[in-house]
Image (cartoon, grey):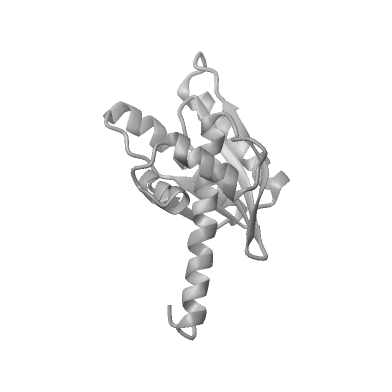
């Protein structure tokens, strides 16, 4: 299974592909899309939508996992919600199933502790994907963590289905 993880941000959005096969996880391409702050928001959203659509076409994921958000400021929440909508739209137009995960869910799945800090999550991403060094920047690490979370959730659901005779 190929999962494209997305960590939405108003100026920097992280992405990362995780491939789950044979009980293991491997990192595919990952990085960030940087959107110029001088561009009006509608143009930044269009650029991001186009970048995500191109990544879907190039990377051929089977599913997408997007980090949901908690933002204390209403204005920031609205902007990040619009950014997240571009990821959801690109996935929907490509026919990809999408899962949304709160940051706490991602931390629990990847670092096994919901209150872990970013460095603990980054170290676990590196270890789980058997990478020689921690991925950078942190937005890319977070996107890989979201994809890992989805892979782990899917494999746990599949195992539960097998254990219950398909009645998970």
Classify residue 1 by image quadrant: bottom right
Of all residues, the one furthest to the bottom in this rendering is 165
Which residue of the protein is positioned furthest toward the right in this rendering? 58
Q: Residue at x 52, y 72 (%)?
A: 158
The relative height of residue 158 versus residue 71 in the rendered view (above or below) is below
Residue situated in front as seen by the camera: 65 or 21: 21
| Front one among 86 and 7 | 7
Residue 43 position in % (x across, y down): 53, 24
The answer, for residue 83, to whether it is visible in the render is no
**Residue at 58% from the left image edge and 39% from the top image edge:** 15
Q: Residue 26, percent across and down?
A: 66, 51
Q: Residue at x 51, y 74 (%)?
A: 159
The residue nearer to you, when weighing 2 against 20, is 20
Q: Is residue 105 above or below residue 13?
A: below
Q: Is residue 61 above or below residue 87?
A: below
Residue 109, percent across and down?
44, 53
In the displayed structure image, the side of residue 2 where residue 37 appears, left or right: left
């Amino acid at each position: 299974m190929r999962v494209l993880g997305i960590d939405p941000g108003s100026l920097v959005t992280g992405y990362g592909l995780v491939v789950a096969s044979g009980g293991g996880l491997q990192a595919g391409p990952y990085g960030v899309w940087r959107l110029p702050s001088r561009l009006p928001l509608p143009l930044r959203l269009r650029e991001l939508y186009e970048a995500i659509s191109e990544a879907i076409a190039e990377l051929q994921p089977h599913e997408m996992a997007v980090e949901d958000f908690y933002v204390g400021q209403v204005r920031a929440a609205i902007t990040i919600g619009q950014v997240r909508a571009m990821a959801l739209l690109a996935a929907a137009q490509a026919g990809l199933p999408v899962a949304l995960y709160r940051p706490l869910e991602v931390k629990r799945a990847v670092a096994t502790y919901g209150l872990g800090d970013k460095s603990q999550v980054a170290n676990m991403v590196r270890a789980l994907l058997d990478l020689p060094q921690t991925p950078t920047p942190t937005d890319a690490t977070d996107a890989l963590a979201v994809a890992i979370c989805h892979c782990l959730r899917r494999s746990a659901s599949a195992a539960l289905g097998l254990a219950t005779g398909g009645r998970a």
